[in-house]
Image: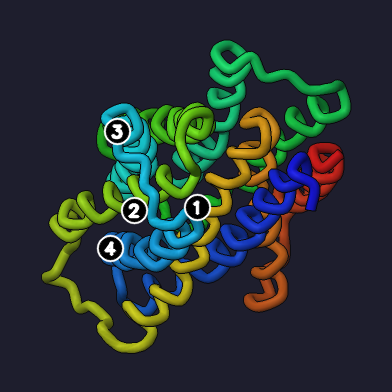
Amino acid sequence: MKEKRLWLFYALITTLFWGVWGAFIEIPEKSGFPATLGYVVWSLTMIPCSLFALSRIGWKLDHDRRSVLLGSAVGLLGAGGQLFLFQALRQGPAYIVFPIISLYPVLTIFLSLIFLRERTHFRQWTGIILAIVAMFFLSNPQINPVSSSAGIGWLILAILVFIMWALQAYAMKFSNITMKAESIFFYMTVTALVLAPVSIAMTDFSAEINWGFRGPWLAAMIQILNAIGALTLVYALRYGKAIIVVPMTGLAPVITVVLSLIFYGVVPGGILLTGLIIASVAIVLLSE
């Protein structure tokens, strides 16, 4: 495959895997396995992906100070944002939290235009704009029921996650300039594991927890999709522009919605259907 098209190959894998992950991630939680422990399982599934990546480069890890700091920053921004998201959903309404966070590519695009000087042609710019619009329509507030809002703490957390994930995508592209993609993912794995105790501390162990197959084991089978998608995202940003890759992978909910239609018999309302149509057009335009 030509190197200039590798970004598309990896971006599509990320979009597909994250879309499937999104469709089934609720199953363990609804079966009694809390999302905070799901985070711990996810951090563990990062390990085999990291080992696979390192084996591809002969275990030659970038370990100079700059690489360690950049790689750790990428990991902390992503994993830390996930932990803040848990807390935001405990305090605030998901139907507001998710649309705010889903638009993080806007900030990533801005940073990439200003600091990385990335440019593209009119057709793909049209796709970028449509992708951003589609993300808002495809935001799924049903992932977590609306909880009682207390003050504006949840809003601050949601905005913080928005900023952290936007910075992570930018930092991932910036790191790829001087680092191996495999090294970036290794540090993402390490930071995810470092934050696992925090997620455990956030878990309500007074509630009954399902430790059977539909708990941690099923969660691992689902979370490995998330981990693989994260790895291919790093590769996509190695070969492609952040202003194109990030909006495309942000359309993973298209896959989630389609699978929900098939497996759960969910009928999309006007908003979701509009999002699906816009996203489909955006993917075609971004792929050119």
Q: Nearer the viewer, residue 142 or 134?
A: 134
Report helix, strand or loop for mark 1: helix
Whether 3 is drawn above or below 213: the answer is: above
Q: Nearer the viewer, residue 280 or 110?
A: 110
**Which kind of residue does numbered mark 1 sit on?**
Ala
Which comes before the other along the chain, label 3 or label 1?
A: 3
Q: Residue at x 62, y 44 (%)?
A: 236
Q: Badge 3 is on which residue?
A: 64
Report helix, strand or loop for mark 2: helix
Q: How busy is the neighbourhood of tag 4: few (under 14 within 10 Å), some, or many (20 plus)? A: many
Name the quarter where the C terminus is drawn.
Answer: top right
Whether 26 is drawn above or below 119: the answer is: below
Whether 207 is drawn above or below 126: the answer is: below
Q: Badge 1 is on which residue?
A: 230
Which comes before the other along the chain, label 4 or label 3?
A: 4
**Which kind of residue does numbered mark 4 sit on?**
Val
Q: How busy is the neighbourhood of tag 1: few (under 14 within 10 Å), some, or many (20 plus)? A: many
**Image side of residue 227 versus residue 87, left or right:** right
Q: Nearer the viewer, mark 4 or mark 3?
A: 3
Q: Badge 2 is on which residue?
A: 189
Q: Nearer the viewer, mark 4 or mark 1?
A: 1
Quadrant hosting residue 250: top right
Which comes before the other along the chain, label 2 or label 1?
A: 2
Q: Are marks 2 and 1 in contact (CB under 8 Å)?
A: no
Q: How busy is the neighbourhood of tag 2: few (under 14 within 10 Å), some, or many (20 plus)? A: many
Whether 57 is drawn above or below 123: the answer is: below
Residue 40, label in figure: 4
